Amino acid sequence: MHRVGGRDVCTSLPSRPELKMAALLLRHVGRHCVRAHLNSQLCIRNAVPLGTTAKEEMERFWSKNTSSNRPVSPHISIYRWSLPMAMSICHRGTGMALSGGISLFGLSALMLPGNFESYLMFVKSLCLGPALIHTAKFVLVLPLMYHSLNGVRHLMWDLGKGLAISQVQQSGVAVLVLAVLSSIGLAAL
């Protein structure tokens, strides 16, 4: 501590390097928070105005392309369907379905009267038979297993492994086979 302008000020920093960095970071953030609080125009003053809007950019793009008589891309119709292409679309679809299903399950648990056990007893009272029960369990668990195994495949790609075309095909078939087999096993439980 020493006196600055008639006040006692602590200027000593901790001795360990990581604590010094933390103290400096807190001091820096604190100063900027105080400045932002005291000067409400700070954000507006530092904002950069946009040149054009998205609508103006799209109009400029389409007017340029129509005036030069450029053809519109045929998009997906020119490509021959392949296993990785179909699996990518299915991966996105199963991800959305699983998110929606979990959200609906959670909302129904919050909104519907009773508890899970009462609904389970209701399903058991329907006497649906083992074949229908196993089929329903298989249909419910297949998207989860496919999405999980294909997600591992994508993680391996992120690591740079298995990116050759033959390896992509083999890993795709392996994911499909493992997803079906593991779903059959889980549905049998």
Image (cartoon, rainbow, N blue to C red):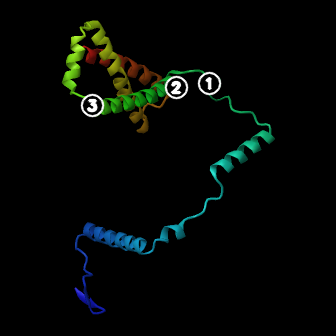
Q: What residue type is labelled 2?
A: Met
Closer to viewer: mark 2 or mark 3: 3
- The answer to the question of whether label 1 and label 3 lie on touching residues, with beta carbons closer than 8 A, is no
Q: How crowded is mark 1: few (under 14 residues within 10 Å), some or many (20 or more)?
A: few
Badge 2 or badge 3: first in the primary sequence:
2
Q: Earlier in the sequence, mark 1 or mark 2?
A: 1
Q: Where is residue 70 in the image (x, y as percent from the top left)?
A: 76, 36
What residue sits right under mark 3 in the picture?
A: 109
Q: Which mark is residue 85?
A: 2
- Asked whether the beta carbons under mark 1 and mark 2 sit within 8 Å of each other, the answer is yes
Task: Give the distance between the C-alpha atoms of the residues marked 1 and 2, in whole angstroms.
Answer: 10 Å
Name the residue at the bottom extreme.
6
Q: Which mark is on residue 79?
A: 1
Amino acid type, mark 3: Ala
Residue 117 at what x, y percent from top left? 19, 23
Say what amino acid the circle numbered 1 marks.
Tyr
Label 2 SS: helix
Which type of secondary structure does the marked residue at label 1 adopt? Answer: loop
Most foreground residue, 39 or 73: 39
Total labels: the figure holds 3
Is residue 92 visible from the viewing direction of this image?
yes
Q: Nearer the viewer, residue 147 or 131?
A: 131
